[in-house]
Image (cartoon, grey):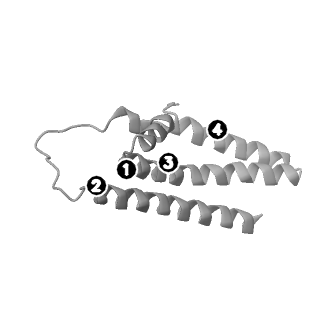
């Protein structure tokens, strides 16, 4: 179980870093080295806030959406670890740890969805 979780975390972080780096290279290739104008605050587009907007942004050729996808993958890595823990505890028939891990997963999902306790 520990080895499988270690592999999952390693693969998740490496995949996230690869996607984020590819987005950064793409951004600089499109002229992203220009100095930004910080005199007027402009918030990021709302399309970068959710997975659907990120995917459509990548399809439209926006490198910042690929960078955002890498960050979303990085956030999903520990959630996938908790979900894998639930499966492994269920296979071991350890009900108490399944219940505790389900509570942890619910807390993670609730915090990422913007739900406040």
Q: Do tag 1 and tag 2 residues touch (Cβ < 8 Å)? A: yes
Distance between the Cα atoms at labels 2 and 4?
A: 40 Å
How packed is label 2: few (under 14 Cα within 10 Å), some, or many (20 or more)?
A: few
Q: Tell me which label, 2 or 3, sits earlier in the chain.
A: 2
Q: Looking at the image, which residue is at 65% across and 43% down?
A: 105
Please determine whether, in this image, residue 81 is positioned above or below residue 115. Answer: below
Q: Image point 40% across, 56% down: which residue? A: 23
Earlier-in-chain disc, 4 versus 3: 3
Q: Is residue 49 left or right of residue 113?
A: left
Q: CA distance from mark 1 to mark 2?
A: 9 Å
- Picture disc at residue 72: 3
Kindly identify which residue carries mark 2.
30
Residue identifier under label 1? 63
Name the front one of labels 1 and 3.
1
Q: Of helix, strand and loop, which one carries label 3? A: helix
- Total labels: the figure holds 4
Q: Residue 40: x and y, percent?
A: 13, 39
Give the camera-side residue of 12 and 66. 66
Element under label 1? Answer: helix
- Across and down, in percent, residue 97 comes to 78, 49
Q: CA distance from mark 1 to mark 3?
A: 14 Å
Given this view, does label 4 or label 1 mark the residue nearer the observer? 1
Q: Quadrant of the N terminus?
A: bottom right
Mark number displayed over residue 106: 4
């Amino acid at each position: 179980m520990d080895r499988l979780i270690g592999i999952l975390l390693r693969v998740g972080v490496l995949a996230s870093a690869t996607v984020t780096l590819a987005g950064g290279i793409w951004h600089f290739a499109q002229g992203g080295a220009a100095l930004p104008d910080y005199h007027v605050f402009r918030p990021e587009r709302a399309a970068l806030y959710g997975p659907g907007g990120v995917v459509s942004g990548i399809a439209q050729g926006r490198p910042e959406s690929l960078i955002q996808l890498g960050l979303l993958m990085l956030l999903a890595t520990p959630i996938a670890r908790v979900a894998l823990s639930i499966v492994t505890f269920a296979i071991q028939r350890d009900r108490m740890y399944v219940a505790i891990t389900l509570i942890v997963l619910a807390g993670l999902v609730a915090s990422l969805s913007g739900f406040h306790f």
